[in-house]
Image (cartoon, coloured by chain):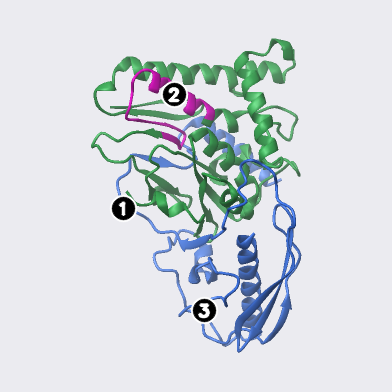
Chain colours: A green, B blue
């Protein structure tokens, strides 16, 4: 059973295969995403992050979740040589680039604890799968054609790995080079990363995309990560181990 | 590190190729990427990077493909620019003999590695390229930034208007 709701400004889909597809399991996961949105959305004036950005909350008053996200963001910044930064060019803090994958991963762990074995959680195209799909096959994920939204250009089978895509064609406002403060101008239109889980895939996809053409090389250097970058000429460049995900 | 060299070699080869094309207007590149999605004007350009596999062992000459006429390079030795290979500088020298890439030597290469725990010293960079091609398969999910929500369309609009200056 699959259910989709619009949360965090994006469609969030949860599909649970088999007998664990109880409504309470969907509700638990969706309620968590709503909570995350209400805490971390910079579009919501009442969210904790908005209040922090307005200087209404001191650091000592940050919620445990906020402290966790800030700590993870700092760690990610170090790991990506500054290419991942939740501080925007205008001095605000926008942790969406980290929170999205983190929240999907947390929701997947919640479903684990509820006894779900076979499911996928998809928030705005970043995906975590577990087990098998309704037909008992490996979950399949298509990589969207950046030139034609209605098409996919690759089919991958993550087998429990996380999948995340960064691209200019929609999230341009969210991706900029922290070193220059400028929006990323790159021949790369989209970069899909498969990593140990969707949190890891998402944060490194975001950082690697900000590196431009060298992003896929950066992914090549990471243990346990593979990448597929599509450039403006319609040429895809993939890491050496990527093809292990392309056969069922 | 090999991958950076590989990338540089290709950049270099492509640059030399472009140069040779520039000085030889009668030659046209007939190759069209099979299955390339013709959704952008950019696709009408010669897609040299599609024509050749990018994973070229540095120690051997780069393969020429059927789509490229042999002997398109001018014999000689060419020094590449110093390129930032993310964790260090890389510079190569390419030797062209008989119109083909015969040798590549390192003039500079990174001598230190990042100690980041995510970076593997065992990595053997072998990037490969292909023309994207639409797939007809049914899938359980699609990975890609989503624009189906109003908030993201609005965000994109703001971004694009800023991009126009």
Which chain contains the residue that carries disc 3?
A: B
Q: Do the residues indicated by labels 2 and 1 lie within the same chain of the protein?
A: no
Foreground residue among A141 and B132: A141
Q: Quadrant of residue A137?
A: top left
- Bin the neighbour count of mark 1 within 10 Å (Cα to Cα): few under 14, some 14-19, many 20 and up: few
Q: Residue at x 71, y 27 (%)?
A: A92
Q: Quadrant of residue B4?
A: bottom right
Q: Position of residue B9 (x, y in %)?
A: 63, 70
Q: What residue is disc 1 on?
A: B136
Q: Do the residues indicated by labels 3 and 1 lie within the same chain of the protein?
A: yes
Q: Does the rendering let one see residue A41?
A: yes
Q: Above or below — where is A48 with respect to B125?
A: above
Q: Which mark is residue A109?
A: 2
Q: Disc 2 vs disc 1: Cβ atoms closer than 8 Å? A: no
* Magenta span: A102-128
The quadrant in which the N terminus of chain A is found is top left
Q: Position of residue A247 (x, y in %)?
A: 34, 52
Q: In 3D space, how far apart are the residues under numbered discs 2 and 1 (Cα atoms)?
A: 32 Å
Q: What residue is disc 3 on?
A: B64
Which chain contains the residue that carries disc 1?
A: B
Q: Position of residue B89 (x, y in %)?
A: 75, 59
Q: Between tags 3 and 1, which lies in front?
A: 3
């Amino acid at each position: 059973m699959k259910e989709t709701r619009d949360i965090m400004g994006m469609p969030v889909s949860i599909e649970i295969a088999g007998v664990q597809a109880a409504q309470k399991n969907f509700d638990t996961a969706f309620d968590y995403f709503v909570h995350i949105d209400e805490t971390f959305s910079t579009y919501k004036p009442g969210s904790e992050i908005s209040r922090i950005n307005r200087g209404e909350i001191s650091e000592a008053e940050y919620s445990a979740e906020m402290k966790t996200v800030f700590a993870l963001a700092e760690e990610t910044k170090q790991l990506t040589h500054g290419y991942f930064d939740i501080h925007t060019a205008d001095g605000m803090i926008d942790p969406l680039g980290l929170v999205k994958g983190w929240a999907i991963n947390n929701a997947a762990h919640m479903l684990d604890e509820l006894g779900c074995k076979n499911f996928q959680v998809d928030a705005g195209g970043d995906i975590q799968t577990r087990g098998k799909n309704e037909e008992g096959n490996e979950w399949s994920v298509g990589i969207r054609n950046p030139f034609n939204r209605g098409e996919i250009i690759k089919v991958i089978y993550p087998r429990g790995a996380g999948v995340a895509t960064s691209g200019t064609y929609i999230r341009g406002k969210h991706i900029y080079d922290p070193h220059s403060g400028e929006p990323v101008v790159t021949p790369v239109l989209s970069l899909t990363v498969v990593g140990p889980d969707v949190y890891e895939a998402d944060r490194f996809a975001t950082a690697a995309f900000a590196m431009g053409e060298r992003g896929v090389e950066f992914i090549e250097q990471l243990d346990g990560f593979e990448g597929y970058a599509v450039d403006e000429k319609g040429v895809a460049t993939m890491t050496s181990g990527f093809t292990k995900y392309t056969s069922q | 590190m090999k991958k950076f060299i590989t990338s540089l070699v290709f950049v270099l080869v492509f640059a030399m190729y472009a140069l040779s094309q520039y000085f030889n207007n009668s030659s046209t590149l007939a190759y069209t990427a099979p299955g390339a999605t013709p959704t952008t004007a950019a696709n009408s350009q010669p897609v040299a990077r599609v024509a050749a596999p990018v994973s070229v062992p540095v120690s051997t000459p780069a393969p020429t493909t059927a789509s490229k006429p042999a002997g398109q390079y001018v014999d000689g030795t060419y020094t590449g620019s110093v390129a930032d290979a993310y964790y260090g500088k890389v510079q190569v020298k390419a030797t062209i003999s008989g119109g083909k890439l015969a040798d590549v030597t390192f003039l500079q290469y990174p001598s230190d590695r990042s100690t980041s725990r995510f970076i593997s010293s065992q990595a053997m960079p072998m990037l490969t390229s292909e023309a994207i091609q639409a797939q007809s398969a049914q899938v359980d999910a699609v990975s890609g930034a989503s624009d189906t929500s109003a908030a993201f369309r609005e965000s994109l609009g703001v971004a694009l208007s800023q991009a126009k200056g």
